[in-house]
Image (cartoon, helix red, strand yellow):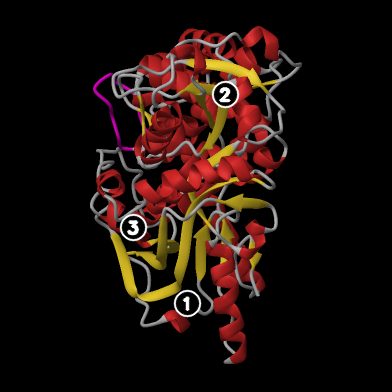
Amino acid sequence: MVRLMWVLLLLSSFLPMTHAATDDQPLKFDTQINTVFGDYDVMKQRRIIRVLIPYSKTFYFIDNNGTQRGIMLELMQQFDKQINKGLKPSQKTHLVFIPTARDQLIPQLIAGRGDVIAANLTITPEREKLVDFSTPLVTNVPELVIASNKAPELKNADSLSGQSVFVNPSTSYVSSIETLNKSLAEKKLPPVVVIKAPGNFEPEDILEMVNANLADYTVVDRYLAILWTQIYPNLVVYENITLRDDSSIALAMRKNSPLLKAQLDEFTAAHKIGTSFGNQQVYKYLRNTKWVKDARSQAELEKFHQVTEIFRKYGEQYNVDWLMMAAQGYQESRLDQTVRSKSGAIGVMQVLPTTGKELKVGDIRLIDPNINAGVKYIRFMRDRYFADEKMTDLNKLLFTFASYNAGPAKIARLRKEAATKGLDPNIWFNNVERIAQLRIGNETVQYVSNIFKYYVAYQLIMEQAKARKADTPPGASKVE
């Protein structure tokens, strides 16, 4: 595509974006104006349509060659072809993709920081008050209950009474659970408890956790369930437990955009599920993935509880989140002190003997000094490389883990490159991790991602233990 003359559009703040790419075009980042309003006629004058899109394994991701992929990406590339058919390069309107966390899609659109939302966004009355939708890409979508194969078996929707369901709170699944809870209340049954996933968790991230027995139940659209059960073998799909069966998924735009809506309606009618293109896209994006392991089996929980006090002790001593350190320990060794690596690393935290000696913590062949060494070393790296950086405490730890895995010099280079490409060098998820995946592959990205997912799982375990003591239902929130 012909590059645009950005100089006429400069404002004080920017967001990361990517141009629409062909199948062979590697990822390129650009920055663009932050806040602009207007209908399709304004977009044509600017020659830019900004597409807000969730960064996920299904809808938008970057492959190992640095090429953009995903169902929604390729869908919108077809829209790009429709609106530019027959035009000269100098007349074309360019799509620019802005990867955005799911809980920020509608707020960013309303704020003028995007023009179209391309996600599996369900039309709901609450959302229709905020945005307009195109003609649906698919209608009558069932929302199904999905379980770990180790979770208690469900017979019907009422069996969810009192159970915890792990979902992103910005999805339509929450309102579906609200409807179920009204029905349960009428039967004088306890409500379903909603466990809120972090805002950047996509449905497949949650399915990955359920598959690994890090959470018991979730809710997803049926087509996603069918897609991901082919990859995640430990999922149980309850086809007979449908929380909603009349969902419609569509593209979204700001209110009062009739010209853009007309273009999108024409496009979605020709590319929705049921058309040749739509059907091909749904089943195209199956790919291998390195799963998180089962950290909630009885044996693994026993190991976790055995080391809890040790991690808590050294977390307090070095002022580091001890649950996050336990999550790293699980990623490194499954919390197994007997593990020895080919490189000579020892124990729960996989500490090299030379590092253990330098840290002066005692015999790292013993579990207490080993965990001491691991936590002390992470604190050392955090202080040395990120103490003065303008990051949240969470991001300082995430970058420390990335540096531990890939080396601090490499992560420093990736942060600099992220800044030059309009990404935030002080945020790991959906920013520097994208450059990391592009430049050094999936290993470090998966390493940090796994630690974070174990961390979320351990938080749930601790909440459940606390709730049992207090004799109250566990979970971040109860939807009644």
Left or right of 174 in this view: 19:
left
Quote the CA–CA distance across marks 3 and 2: 32 Å
* Magenta highlight range: 338-348
Residue shown at the point (52%, 23%) measured from the top left: 93
Left or right of 64 in this view: 395:
right
Residue shown at the point (29%, 21%) measured from the top left: 344
Q: Which is more toward the observer, 29 or 151?
A: 29
User: Disc 3 vs disc 1: which is toward the camera?
Assistant: 3
User: Disc 2 vs disc 1: which is toward the camera?
Assistant: 2
Q: Earlier in the sequence, mark 3 or mark 1?
A: 1
Q: Which is more toward the observer, 228 or 469?
A: 228
Q: Position of residue 316 (x, y in %)?
A: 66, 37
User: Disc 3 vs disc 2: which is toward the camera?
Assistant: 2
Q: Residue 31: within the magenta?
A: no
Task: Please tell me whether mark 1 sits on a helix, a strand or a loop.
Answer: helix
Compared to residue 93, the image places residue 261 above or below, namely below
Name, please, the residue furthest toward the front: 86
Q: From this viewpoint, is residue 159 visible?
A: yes
Tell me the crowding category of disc 3: few under 14, some 14 to 19, or many 20 or more residues within 10 angstroms, Cα based. Answer: some
Tell me the crowding category of disc 2: few under 14, some 14 to 19, or many 20 or more residues within 10 angstroms, Cα based. Answer: some
Q: Residue 342: within the magenta?
A: yes
Q: Which residue is mark 1?
A: 160
Q: Earlier in the sequence, mark 3 or mark 2?
A: 2
Quote the CA–CA distance across marks 3 and 1: 22 Å
Q: Position of residue 311 (x, y in %)?
A: 55, 41
Q: Amino acid at mark 2?
A: Ile
Q: Which residue is mark 3?
A: 223
Q: Quadrant of residue 439?
A: top left
Task: Please tell me whether mark 2 sits on a helix, a strand or a loop.
Answer: strand
Q: Which mark is residue 48?
A: 2
